[in-house]
Image (cartoon, rainbow, N blue to C red):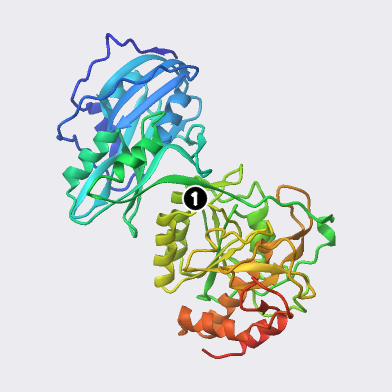
């Protein structure tokens, strides 16, 4: 079917349609549904920019919609809604072409005009703010009449644009992370959102950090400068972008030539290790090793690993693979894994995606988090998130980096995170390992993998490998001494380190080699 939206015919109707209520209460996926018409005063909005080469220009602000479309498919329009954090599902086979413009229309009225004879359901959610709340559009389902229970397909967000500041940091275009000072009222918060044309996409409740979607082509540096002058703003940053480390095997191997340990399933209730990385191909783990998983890039889909890096790290962390030089496996049960896909197909993650991943780690009871990635971009919001996790008795470890530099790499260089460098199998410092005052120690940094990371199976090297191996030992220690605090565990580990060879500098307090690991696991807190 074809829908043509004529700007002269589309007027704000300011009422809800009974068709919506007929379907919305019977939907099992919705939970508690809030159908609320907001009564706040609405400021005049800036008109949409010229669409240029794009076929869809959409703005969702204070739950009102402005849209310009040029022969756009229904899916393209719904992808634009998904960019605002809206969970969108569409029945297979439903198609439409949309052209025209609407300006500053309530969400329900906009969907009624856009979808014509198609049925739709919408879900609102409450986003907490102080003692009040902010309402945001949370979900849209589109289907033919009488087909509300037919299979639906998830509609992911449209293409994400990545820009670069003059200082070199990359960030998600048209997004900002915002924290408010205590005492700012919900009304003032909403007024601030309206002043920048922003819509709340999500919130980190622990930190009180809001992810805000902005109008297309927002001048973010200018907006940041203005928001930093606002008395009620406690923190504001771009939603920074982070990369997985580039990697290639030092030699290729056939998957069959790599030895995987057969491990007994972890004991029920054993402490878990969270691997925050590119995801997991679960078939590579031993039976019973996966405690929980989440795809932070798209929570509606099951976890996968299109890159391979996260699966490699999970194999080390769970104990199925041991790094070169680490000795003979002891035959004990493996470490349970909480696998989190924080990086997309391009190997990219964001500040808010990392905060969401930390939240999931806490919720799943992971006492240790391994992060084999890093960036030279420092984020005060992420620093606060990691420190909060450390204060909650979580132990966080991160790779120091593979550039041979002394510059601090983050998250390894944050105060609440242990920075892990790499050494060779013989204990010598690996030449590619970053070093510096922020480095805590080094450990084995090479291993053979039956699955590649952006490449074929083979032998890989880097601080990435050292990090989950140490994290696994800490998780095993927590299983032996469940009452030990993170401070006691870190002290026991530091006191167990083997000394560096004479003349080694900038490599932390020592080497976490096989002897150090044995001493550590035999040392009571």
Q: Is residue 103 above or below residue 491?
A: above
Left or right position of 509 against 104: right
Residue 245, percent from left and from top? 65, 52
State the quadrant of the N terminus.
top left
Indicate the position of residue 354 as horizontal and vertical percent values.
Answer: 48, 54
User: Can residue 419 be spotted in the picture?
Assistant: yes
**Horizontal relation, residue 276 to residue 124: left or right:** right
**SS at mark 1 in the image:** loop
Q: Please give the residue where the numbered disc 1 appears in the rendered image.
A: 296
Q: Nearer the viewer, residue 402 or 117?
A: 402
Q: Please indicate whether residue 458 sits to the left or right of residue 413 in the image.
A: right
Q: Residue furthest front?
A: 503
Q: Residue at x 64, y 59 (%)?
A: 401
Q: Nearer the viewer, residue 26 or 497?
A: 497
Please tell me in which quadrant of the rendered image residue 346 appears.
top right
Vertical side of 393 occupied by 66: above or below: above
Residue 335 visible somewhere in the drawing: no
Location of residue 252 by image quarter? bottom right
Q: Nearer the viewer, residue 1 or 254?
A: 254
Q: Residues within 10 Å of mark 1 (few under 14, many from 20)?
A: many
Residue 142 image offset from top left, x and y in percent: 39, 29
Total tally of numbered discs in the picture:
1
User: Residue placed at 71% from the left, 75% from the top?
Assistant: 504
User: Looking at the picture, how far across and down is residue 309, in whole percent?
Assistant: 66, 54
């Amino acid at each position: 079917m074809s829908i043509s939206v004529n700007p002269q015919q589309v007027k704000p109707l300011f009422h809800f349609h009974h068709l919506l209520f007929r379907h919305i209460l019977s939907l099992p996926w919705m939970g508690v549904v809030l159908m609320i018409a907001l009564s706040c005063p609405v400021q005049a909005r800036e008109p949409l920019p010229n669409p240029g080469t794009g076929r869809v220009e959409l703005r969702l602000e204070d739950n009102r919609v402005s849209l310009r479309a040029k022969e756009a498919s229904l899916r393209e329009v719904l992808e634009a809604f998904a960019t605002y954090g809206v969970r969108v599902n569409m029945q297979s086979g439903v198609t439409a072409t949309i052209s025209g413009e609407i300006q500053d229309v309530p969400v329900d009225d906009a969907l009624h005009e856009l979808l014509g004879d198609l049925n739709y359901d919408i879900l609102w959610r409450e986003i907490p703010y102080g003692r009040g709340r902010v309402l945001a559009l949370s979900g849209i389902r589109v289907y033919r009449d009488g087909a509300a229970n037919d299979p639906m397909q998830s509609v992911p967000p449209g293409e994400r644009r990545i820009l670069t500041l003059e200082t070199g940091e990359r960030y998600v275009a048209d997004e900002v992370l915002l924290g408010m000072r205590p005492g700012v009222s919900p009304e003032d918060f909403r007024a601030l959102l309206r002043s920048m044309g922003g819509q709340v996409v999500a919130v980190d409740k622990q930190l009180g950090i809001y992810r805000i979607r902005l109008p297309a082509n927002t001048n973010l540096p200018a907006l940041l400068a203005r928001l930093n002058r606002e008395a009620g703003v406690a923190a504001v940053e771009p939603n920074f972008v982070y990369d997985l480390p580039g990697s290639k095997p030092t030699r290729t191997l056939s998957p069959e030539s790599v030895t995987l340990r057969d491990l007994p399933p972890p004991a029920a209730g054993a402490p878990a290790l969270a691997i925050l990385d590119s995801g997991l191909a679960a078939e590579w783990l031993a039976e019973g090793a996966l405690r929980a998983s989440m795809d932070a890039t798209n929570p509606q889909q099951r976890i996968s690993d299109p890159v391979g890096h996260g699966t490699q790290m999970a194999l080390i962390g769970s104990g199925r693979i041991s790094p070169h030089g680490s000795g003979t496996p002891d035959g004990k049960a493996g470490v349970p894994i909480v696998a989190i896909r924080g990086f997309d197909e391009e190997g990219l993650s964001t500040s808010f995606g990392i905060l969401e991943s930390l939240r999931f780690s806490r919720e799943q009871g992971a006492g240790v988090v391994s992060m084999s990635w890093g960036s030279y971009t420092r984020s005060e919001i992420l620093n606060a998130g990691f420190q909060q996790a450390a204060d909650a008795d979580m132990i966080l470890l991160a790779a120091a980096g593979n550039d041979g530099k002394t510059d601090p790499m983050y998250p390894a260089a944050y105060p609440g995170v242990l920075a892990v460098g790499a050494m060779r199998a013989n204990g010598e410092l690996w030449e590619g390992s970053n070093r510096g005052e922020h480095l805590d120690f080094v450990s084995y940094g090479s291993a053979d993998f039956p699955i590649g990371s952006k490449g074929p199976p083979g032998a890989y090297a880097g601080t990435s490998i050292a990090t989950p191996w140490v994290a696994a030992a800490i998780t095993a220690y927590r299983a032996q001494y469940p009452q030990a605090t993170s401070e006691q565990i870190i002290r026991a580990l530091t006191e167990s380190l083997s000394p560096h060879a004479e003349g080694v500098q900038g490599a932390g307090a020592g080497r976490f080699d096989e002897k150090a690991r044995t001493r550590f696991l035999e040392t009571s807190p």
